[in-house]
Image (cartoon, helix red, strand yellow):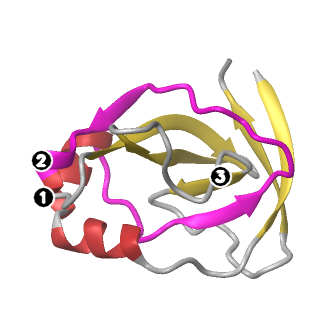
């Protein structure tokens, strides 16, 4: 297991919340739970490449570009959560870069900019 420390950044553009609200069954089928729509973005300073546990394929959520969503199970301040990393299939980019970890959970994760959090990855 590795643990990284970071700070919650300002809010993003809301694309993940739209996806989760438009396709709740897809997200439920993938995770087995109802996630709070949207992600909490945490800047950990150094890129942390994702380790995929499972994914939602672009066509399941009608993505306009070929972009899958990679999921990695983790814990945020002890709360079970998922890192969700958009993956542009054309070039491997996506999200806000691998130094910004996008997190979602069925429980509330602290989301005030500047809040410090610890993210534990099972590696």
Q: Could you tell me how far apart the alpha carbons at marks 1 and 2 are, in whole angstroms?
A: 5 Å
The boundaries of the magenta stretch are 32-60
Q: Could you tell me how far apart the alpha carbons at marks 1 and 3 are, in whole angstroms?
A: 23 Å
Check the image and name the residue furthest to the front: 91
Looking at the rendering, which quadrant does residue 16 occupy? Answer: bottom left
**Residue 34 falls within the magenta-colored stretch:** yes
The quarter of the picture where the N terminus appears is top right
| Residue with the mark numbered 3 | 101
Residue 80 in the image: x percent, y percent? 57, 45
Between 76 and 100, the one lying in front of the other is 100
Question: Which of the labelled discs sits on residue 59, or is there none?
Answer: 2
Judging from the image, what secondary structure is the residue with disc 1 in? loop
The dominant secondary structure in magenta is loop
Q: Is residue 66 above or below residue 116?
A: above
Answer whether labels 1 and 2 touch (C-beta < 8 Å): yes
Question: Which of the labelled discs sits on residue 45, or is there none?
Answer: none
């Amino acid at each position: 297991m590795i643990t990284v420390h970071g700070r919650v950044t300002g809010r993003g553009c809301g694309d993940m919340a739209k996806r989760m609200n438009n396709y709740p069954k897809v997200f439920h089928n993938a995770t087995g739970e109802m996630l709070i729509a949207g992600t909490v973005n945490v800047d950990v300073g150094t890129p942390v490449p994702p380790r995929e546990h499972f994914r939602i394929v672009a066509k399941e959520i009608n993505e306009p570009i070929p972009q899958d969503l990679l999921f990695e199970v983790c814990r945020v301040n002890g709360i079970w959560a998922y890192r969700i990393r958009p993956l542009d299939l054309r070039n491997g980019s996506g999200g806000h870069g691998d130094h910004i970890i996008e997190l979602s959970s069925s429980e509330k994760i602290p989301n005030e900019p500047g809040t410090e959090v610890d993210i534990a990855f099972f590696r």
